[in-house]
Amino acid sequence: MKFGVREICNVAFKCKADNTKIGDRTFMKDELVIYFDTCKTSSLEGSATDVYAQGGRGNPKLVTWSGEKEMKFTFEDALISPLGLSILVGANLTTSEDYYHHVLLKGRASGESGSATIDISDEITDLAGADAKLCDGKTGSDKAAAPKVYQTDEAGSEIGTAVTSVTVAENVLSCSTFANGKYYYIDGYVKVSGSSLQITADKFSDYFYIEAETLFRRESDGVDRPAQFVIPKGKVSSNFNIAMANSGDPSTFSFEVTAMPDYIKFDRTEKVLCAINILD
């Protein structure tokens, strides 16, 4: 029976050990960690090293030794989640209600000399939501988030002289030196909820039990039959490249998994790099 292959894989990562901490969650053995169902490409590649004893006239190859067999499973995802990105880059993932998100806004002062203000409520709402507030820098960790204000022109072509003694209240900035109708840059932070990836020198991706499902089309009747690649111990490479551009195709996220010998969950007779299962 022969098959043709022209379909993408859906890929499941499962935990290899109890009490494995990934980001701010703890997983137990065999628990599903993440499921990739928006892949664009996937491939399974094997390689081995051959060395030879050679001799005699013409130095022909006489005996072959094969070894160092390797298998790599590579897939490219069109979309990514914070958890998927943390696995890809080998980073600590945390979630919080109080992340500091940088904003750089241009505002126009209005009001009488000595009491002019800059209202950036609409700009903050557009960037970070209706409840977001520009940090005033008065207390605690907010001190490092105090806004910096600079003079500029209507076009915002350059960052000019810094303005001091600026106060913030409900996304409205006040300063006695603001001039009515003049433009200013506001360099500040808003507190928002979200996820954060902390990339450190000593954090790498974990091992995963990987099941990749695809379809093989049967030659005899043209029927697609489920097929599955099982990698009992896969290590995601922490090499990554996230390309960003304002034209062309959107960025994709490439995962390279090195297969290592281990037991399949349902067959502990022999350690394997990978098993390929095809349904009749």
Image (cartoon, grey):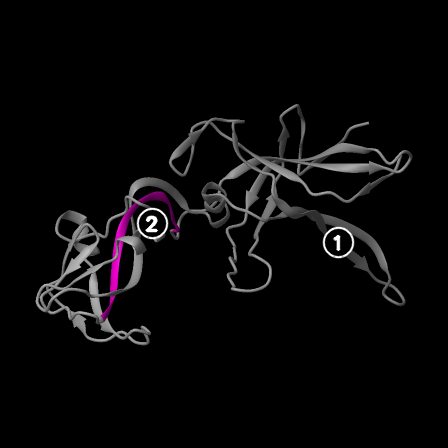
**Residue 130 on image: x %, y %:** 31, 45
Q: Which tag, 1 or 2, sits closer to the chain's start?
A: 1
Q: Is residue 105 above or below residue 64?
A: below
Q: Is residue 188 at all visible to an observer of this figure? A: yes
- Assess whether residue 192 is covered by the magenta stretch: yes
Residue drawn at the location 40% of the way across and 39% of the way down: 23
Magenta span: predominant SS is: strand
Q: Quadrant of the C terminus?
A: top right
In the image, the segment drawn in magenta is 183-199
Residue for badge 1? 50
Above or below residue 121? Residue 28 is: above
Would you name the residue on which mark 2 appears? Answer: 128
From the viewer's side, name the closer residue of 33 and 154. 154
Q: Amino acid at mark 2?
A: Ala
Q: Is residue 115 left or right of residue 50?
A: left
Tag nearer the camera, 1 or 2: 2
How many neighbours does mark 1 have within 10 angstroms: few (below 14), some (14-19), or many (20 or more)? few
On whether residue 113 falls in the magenta region, the answer is no
